[in-house]
């Protein structure tokens, strides 16, 4: 197995993704309307216990550009969901490492007690284990309404540690085993092309790991094991036009921003802001307002991540 990354795509054409409404070729840029808010994400802060070499959000032990959101700051958004009858089914917590935020257990309690599902994205390392008692209490009271998605970049230690830090795979795997042993609902997130392997090989490799470790995850299930594409904003991709929906046979309703929004609190801000999606936390054009109602407007797909990650999925938008 090679540990070399696949050949990098060509650099992004600087004329692309400049105008939110018109592409570099002068065509109408695609937009996505919010069909119904089904998922709300909370970025708990960009601080993380490790610094990964390819973190799209640039999390690290020193980066607090997105500061900790508190339980008190989340509650008005939960109240807005209840008051306006918004169809939110799940509230997800991402970071940084969410378990570094000491208010996470209180936020999970607030979310779960209101009848929403909760999802936490974690590296399953020491910060998570520091909250073991609170997690066990939440498990006892809410069961499978709480899901923890553990980040494992690869099914082998070599590539995972190359991305994160030496020894991190063993620690994360120990945390994943603990979650499975204690009866939590667990998923795993990996990287589809890491190391140059195809998706089928990656799923086979993870299946072997899960079987060996006694972890009850179906590696063939694309939700239980999510394999994400690489997140290189500087790599060239086509711009998405209004004509692309028909060309690609895709619907704007299937895009992330048709059903989800994310809360962040920027360093120095008085209150959290609502963003279009989880992938673009630092781009101000995707900041939509201070309430969920304000953020219900359409989103222009004016970023390479909109194309590569959300729309194309390996397809080509060309006649």
Image (tube, rainbow, N blue to C red):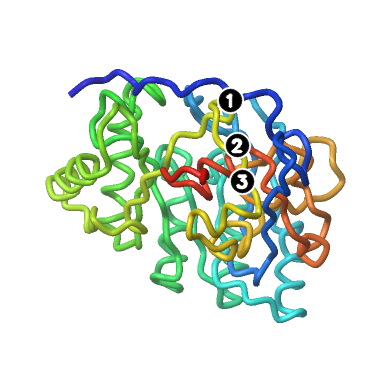
- Give above or below for 48 relative to 167: below
Q: Residue at x 73, y 65 (%)?
A: 75
Mark 3 crowdedness (10 Å alpha carbons): few <14, some 14-19, many ≥20: many
Residue 9, label in figure: none
Q: Residue at x 68, y 65 (%)?
A: 34
Q: Residue at x 36, y 45 (%)?
A: 227
Q: Which residue is mark 1?
A: 234
Comes first in the chain, label 2 or label 3: 3
- Give above or below for 66 relative to 258: above
> Comparing marks 3 and 1, which lies closer to the viewer?
3
Position of residue 115 in the picture relative to residue 152 (left or right): right
- Give above or below for 235 relative to 213: above
Position of residue 153 in the picture relative to residue 295 (left or right): left
Q: Which residue is mark 3?
A: 240
Is label 3 in a helix, a strand or a loop? loop
Comes first in the chain, label 2 or label 1: 1
Comes first in the chain, label 3 or label 1: 1
State which quarter of the image contains the N terminus.
Answer: top left
Q: Residue at x 34, y 34 (%)?
A: 193
Q: Which residue is mark 2?
A: 304
Q: Position of residue 165 (x, y in %)?
A: 39, 22
The answer for how far apart the CA atoms under marks 2 and 1 are is 8 Å
Q: Nearer the viewer, residue 71 or 51?
A: 51
Q: Nearer the viewer, residue 211 or 98?
A: 211
Q: Are marks 2 and 1 in contact (CB under 8 Å)?
A: yes
């Amino acid at each position: 197995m090679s540990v070399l990354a696949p050949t990098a795509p060509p650099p992004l054409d600087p004329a692309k993704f400049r105008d939110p409404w018109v592409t570099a070729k002068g065509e109408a840029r695609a937009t996505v309307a919010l069909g119904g808010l089904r998922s709300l994400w909370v970025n708990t802060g960009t601080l993380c216990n490790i610094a990964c070499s390819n973190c799209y959000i640039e999390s690290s032990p020193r980066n607090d550009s997105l500061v900790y959101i508190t339980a008190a700051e989340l509650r008005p958004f939960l109240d807005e969901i209840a008051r306006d009858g918004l169809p939110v089914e799940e509230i997800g917590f991402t970071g940084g490492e969410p378990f570094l935020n000491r208010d996470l257990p209180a936020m999970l309690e607030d979310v779960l007690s209101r009848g929403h599902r909760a999802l936490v994205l974690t590296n399953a390392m020491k910060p998570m284990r520091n909250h073991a008692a609170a997690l066990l209490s939440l498990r006892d009271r809410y069961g499978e309404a709480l899901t923890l998605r553990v980040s494992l970049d690869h099914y082998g230690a070599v590539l995972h540690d190359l991305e994160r830090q030496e020894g991190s795979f063993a620690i994360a795997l120990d945390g994943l085993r603990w979650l499975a042993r204690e009866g939590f609902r667990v998923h795993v997130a990996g990287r589809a092309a890491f190391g140059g392997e195809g998706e089928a090989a990656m799923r086979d490799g993870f299946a072997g790991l899960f079987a060996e470790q006694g972890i009850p995850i179906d590696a063939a299930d694309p939700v239980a094991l999510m394999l994400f594409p690489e997140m290189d904003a500087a790599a060239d991709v086509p711009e998405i036009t209004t004509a692309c929906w028909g060309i690609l046979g895709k619907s704007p309703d299937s895009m992330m921003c048709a059903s989800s929004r994310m809360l962040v609190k920027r360093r120095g801000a008085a209150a959290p802001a609502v963003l279009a999606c989880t992938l673009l936390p630092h781009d101000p054009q995707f900041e939509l307002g201070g309430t969920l109602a304000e953020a219900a407007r359409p989103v222009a797909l004016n970023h390479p991540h909109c194309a590569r990650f959300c729309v194309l999925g390996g397809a080509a938008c060309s006649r």
